[in-house]
Amino acid sequence: MKVDLKYDVITRNNNYIEDLFGFEDIHKKYPGITEKRWQIISRGDLEVGMSTDECRLSIGDPIEIVLKKDNRFENWFYNGKTLEFESGTLQRFK
């Protein structure tokens, strides 16, 4: 049996917590997101023009997604909130 000492409390590496819990610099994973948008995301807010990824990062996964007209239009439904996308860009929310 091979033991992975990477997670051993005594011999752990410098990225022990990040490796154990999957933490990483999320900015590196989404390099196209501007600093202004990161501020909006960190508050859990939305702004017209956000991408689907930015919306997911900001308010989480929707309860339901409905695709319309050749999958170009999407409606995302949350408890009490609806997001309307065209070609992956937020057009309006209510």
Image (cartoon, rainbow, N blue to C red):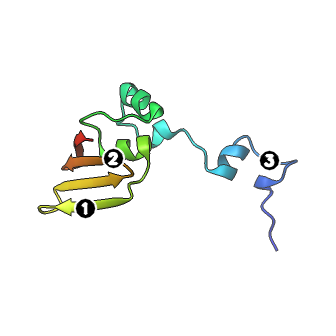
Q: Tag 1: residue type?
A: Val
Farthest residue, direction front: 80
Q: Which residue is mark 2?
A: 81
Q: Dot 1: few (<14), some (14–19), or many (≥20) neighbours within 10 Å?
A: few
Farthest residue, direction left: 69
At 32% from the left and 54% from the top, the residue drawn is 77
Seen from the viewer's position, the closer of residues 79 and 61 is 79
Mark 3 to mark 1 CA distance (whole Å): 46 Å
**Residue 52 left/right relative to 42:** left
Q: Which residue is mark 1?
A: 66
In this rendering, is residue 70 above or below 48?
below
Q: Dot 2: few (<14), some (14–19), or many (≥20) neighbours within 10 Å?
A: few
User: What percent of the width, then of the height, locates residue 10?
Assistant: 88, 47
Q: Which residue is mark 3?
A: 12
- Marks 1/2 in contact by CB < 8 Å: the verdict is no
Q: Tag 2: residue type?
A: Lys
